């Protein structure tokens, strides 16, 4: 049974080694930011830099591993029906909405949703790294490095499945940034399963 994350909210939960996590976009064009922390020591967390370095690519998909800051595999992508996700940009936040969008009463964004969801696990705001931004479609100009956030390529029912290679605390959001989600905020579904 899939669980639903309401638009512009987040959730955190334990994911045991050997289990799978499937993240589903039920309506299409909706990003879900994902964080992972080692359950035994929260100072070990998802590392964008190490994962990109070891893959030799900035776009990760089926077969690729998501590494920790201690260079251990946390999660492996075992299924991916979209093939375009971002692992460069930080979670959207109130500050980001002020700086990029000029919002005067900004939403707390994925950052604020992560902080609330992770507080019961004793994980604070400064411990939140770059998230794996599922379904986020960032186009990059190879020469200038200029980035453009485009609508997600995901359609209703598209999914990504990760296999956990250590006991984890995982956090997921239904992203709150207008640009990342083609201007509207939708829910995200997720399902925890047995090992493949
Ligand atoms: Zn977001």
Image: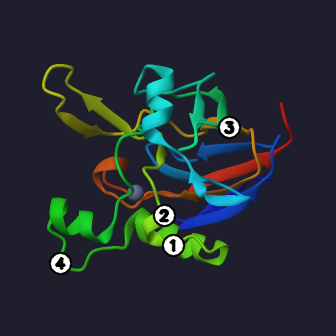
Counting every numbered tag in the picture gives 4
Which is closer to the viewer, label 4 or label 2? 2
Which is closer to the viewer, label 1 or label 4? 1
Which is closer to the viewer, label 3 or label 1? 1
Q: CA distance from mark 3 to mark 1?
A: 25 Å
Mark positioned earlier in the residue sequence (3 or 1): 1
Position of residue 188 relative to residue 117, above or below, is: above
Percent position of residue 28, x then y = 49, 43
Q: In this figure, which residue is indicated by the disc labeled 1? A: 124
Q: Nearer the viewer, residue 20 or 167?
A: 167
Q: Residue furthest right?
A: 194
Q: In this figure, which residue is indicated by the disc labeled 2? A: 127
Mark positioned earlier in the residue sequence (4 or 2): 4
- Within-10-Å neighbours for mark 1: few <14, some 14–19, many 20+: few
- Within-10-Å neighbours for mark 4: few <14, some 14–19, many 20+: few
Q: In this figure, which residue is indicated by the disc labeled 3? A: 162
Position of residue 166 relative to residue 140, above or below, is: below
Q: CA distance from mark 3 to mark 2?
A: 22 Å
Q: Residue at x 30, y 71 (%)?
A: 94
Which is closer to the viewer, label 3 or label 2? 2
Mark 4–mark 3 contact, CB under 8 Å? no
Q: CA distance from mark 4 to mark 2?
A: 26 Å
Badge number at residue 104 = 4
Q: Quadrant of the C terminus?
A: top right
Q: CA distance from mark 1 to mark 2?
A: 6 Å
Instruction: Assign a secondary structure to mark 3.
Output: strand
């Amino acid at each position: 049974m899939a669980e639903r994350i309401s638009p512009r909210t987040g959730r955190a939960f334990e994911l045991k080694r050997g289990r799978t996590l499937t993240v589903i976009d039920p309506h299409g064009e909706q990003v879900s930011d994902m964080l992972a922390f080692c359950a035994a020591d929260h100072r070990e967390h998802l590392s964008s830099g190490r994962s990109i370095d070891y893959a030799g690519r900035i776009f990760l998909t089926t077969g690729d591993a998501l590494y920790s800051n201690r260079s251990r595999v946390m999660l492996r992508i075992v299924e991916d029906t979209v093939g375009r996700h971002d692992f460069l940009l930080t979670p959207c936040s109130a500050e980001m909405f002020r700086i990029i969008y000029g919002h005067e009463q900004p939403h707390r964004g994925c950052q604020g949703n992560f902080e609330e969801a992770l507080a019961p696990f004793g994980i604070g705001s400064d411990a939140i790294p770059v998230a794996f931004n599922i379904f986020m479609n960032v186009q990059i100009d190879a020469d200038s490095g200029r980035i453009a956030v485009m609508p997600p390529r995901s359609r209703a029912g598209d999914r990504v499945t990760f296999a956990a290679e250590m006991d984890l605390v995982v956090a997921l959001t239904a992203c709150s940034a207008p640009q990342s989600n083609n201007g509207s905020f939708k829910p995200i579904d997720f399902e925890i399963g047995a090992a493949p």
